[in-house]
Amino acid sequence: MIVSALGKSINQLSDPQFKKVFLKSVMLSAFCIICLSTIFTFLFSYFWSSLGLPFNSIVSTIGGLLLFLVGMWAFSPTIAIFFNGLFQDEIISAVERKYYTYNKVEKHQMLYKEINFNIKLFVKLILFNLLILPFFFIPPVYFILYWTVNGYLISYEYFSIVRMRYNNHDNIEKKIIVFIFGIIIAILFTLPVINFFAPAIAIASTVHIYKQMEKGR
């Protein structure tokens, strides 16, 4: 189920309509992440030099570079998810046009509801990722926490959005499959470059998995 959904989503990356949407999300995400990481790098360099500490040029350069890389890696998924949320309806619509033309979509107040869901997800991701960030220097613990926390949040929120879209208010079934799917997406978030595409793949795959669950009822 999960492998099939991911395969369909990755395969659709070449679809012109799908490509147009996720490229907008990727470009906005990349621009925002580079800007924020550059600002943090500059602030670190300025702070170190303002204290008059020794080895200013070396430490500020190395420390700034490390801070830039950490910022790029740790927070790029959260930012990518935020911008992906702006085009979320277009991504789902592209999947529906190709695979599920028979859908009866609940459009009433959908935009407001989706924005509300994505804001909540964005805030949760920031808060929880800040909480686990101190474990960054203990890689095994950090990765387990990162995959578990982000996997749960992403899978639960995305499935809630899709369920709401189809006007289904039942609880999510097969929660273990949903959670495993979330872990896989969270792992994709830890892979450089791929993490920019992961949110679009995640929301598209969520539609496929939901439809397969719905068919199995």
Image (cartoon, rainbow, N blue to C red):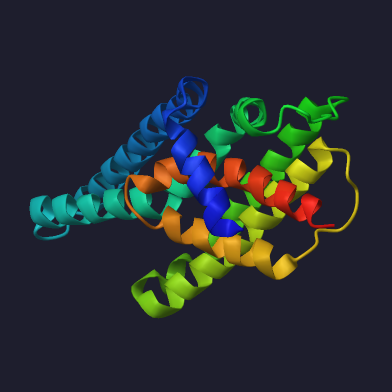
Above or below, 205 against 85 in this view is: below
Q: From the image, which quarter does the N terminus lie in? A: bottom right
Above or below, 208 against 91 in this view is: below
Residue closer to the observer: 44 or 36: 36
Expressed as whole percent of the image width and height from the top left, the position of residue 13 reads: 44, 33
Q: From the image, which quarter does the C terminus lie in? A: bottom right
Residue closer to the observer: 105 or 109: 105
Quarter of the image where one finds residue 182: bottom right
Give the residue at x 52% y 20%.
17
Residue closer to the observer: 190 or 106: 106
Can the viewer see residue 79 in this picture?
no
Can the viewer see residue 60 in this picture?
yes
Quarter of the image where one finds residue 74: bottom left
Q: Is residue 215 left or right of residue 20?
A: right
Give the residue at x 59% y 27%.
87
Above or below, 29 against 131 in this view is: above
Above or below, 24 against 45 in this view is: above
Q: Is residue 103 left or right of residue 153?
A: right
Expressed as whole percent of the image width and height from the top left, the position of residue 192 reads: 32, 50
Give the residue at x 86% y 26%.
109
